[in-house]
Image (cartoon, rainbow, N blue to C red):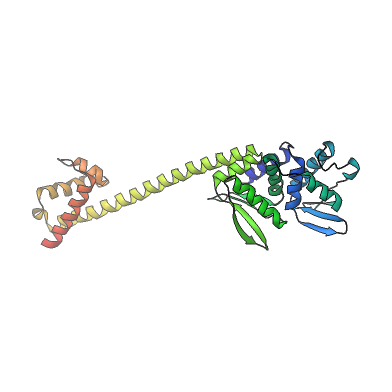
Amino acid sequence: MEKFNTIIWDELINVPLSEPCAEFLGFLDALPRSESGAAVSFTCPRPVVGRRLLKLWKSLNERPFSAKIESSDMSFELDMKQGRASFLLTMDILKRISEGSGMRTGSEKWAWFRGLWGGCGVIYLPQSGYYMTFRPHVTASGERAKAILSSAGMPPAVREKRGRAEYMLRSQEQIVTCLSKMGLVKSSLMLEETAIVRSIRNRVNKVINCDSANIRKTVEAARQQLALVDRIDAEGLWDLLTPVQAELAETRRLNPSASLSELGLMLSKPVSKSTVEYRWRKLNADLESKT
């Protein structure tokens, strides 16, 4: 889990800056904010988010886009304290960033979603299951993200948590697709690899458990049958047995660890496992009725 988180956040920092304005707005829609006069203060819960924001901000400064933010407006500083990053934007700049991300194309929408998820999302990989969640601080952003996911065939589950709506994907296939659409290809491939390893491990465990259960059944059946043979010896009941029953009892005595299938093949006229089971039940019932 720790290795996967390291890879996904490293990839988020370095993914190509295809739609910086849309992605930056996604982060803004996700992060905690507080308004003070003509400015808005944002807090990044992870320093890695601040590093990505710095890259996006620099890209906005270098590329023209529809909002036409001038270089003199592009004052942006991160204050790193106690493992968090915070920054301040004026209302005017915030408005122009919002206007600059048209959200018209698919690439813009998924860049925005990448920012949103990067600002308030996480992936959990417990011992079983897969969880991709996000809880944006702007209520309308959650519904926008839900619409983007739903249009791609990945409608998220929604629940209330700590006073905000939390959106969740629990299908490994959907999470892989979502990561891929966000441009986090390396992370999506690693998640697929994790799913394959889990599947193989689960199959191995099932086989081992099944084999263990079969061994226990075989041992218990042999124990009961040997106890019945010992009783036949102790009470001198051999004359009450049919030739078929006598052969079955003697074969068990000579092969105490054989399975029922193996026991059936050892008889003079080989029979199936189910026939061996039937004969033991019949032998036990006959002895009970005759003694």
The single residue placed furthest to the left in the displayed view is 239
Task: Measuring from the top left, give residue 55's x and y in whole percent.
Answer: 79, 40
Viewer-proximal residue, 286 or 30? Answer: 30
Residue drawn at the location 51% of the way across and 44% of the way down: 198
In this rendering, the answer to whether 35 lies above or below 60 is below
Task: Measuring from the top left, give residue 11's x and y in whole percent.
Answer: 69, 39
- Whether residue 205 is visible here, answered yes or no, is yes
Quarter-of-image position of residue 157? bottom right
Viewer-proximal residue, 166 or 259? Answer: 166
Residue drawn at the location 63% of the way across and 40% of the way down: 181
Instruction: Tell me: 235 left or right of 3.
Output: left
The single residue placed furthest to the right in the displayed view is 72
Quarter-of-image position of residue 60? top right
Instruction: Tell me: 182 left or right of 79.
Output: left
Instruction: Tell me: 222 left or right of 147.
Output: left
Task: Measuring from the top left, give residue 147's x and y in whole percent.
Answer: 63, 50
Residue drawn at the location 44% of the way across and 44% of the way down: 203
Quadrant in the picture for the C terminus: bottom left
Task: Measuring from the top left, give residue 131's x and y in whole percent.
Answer: 59, 51
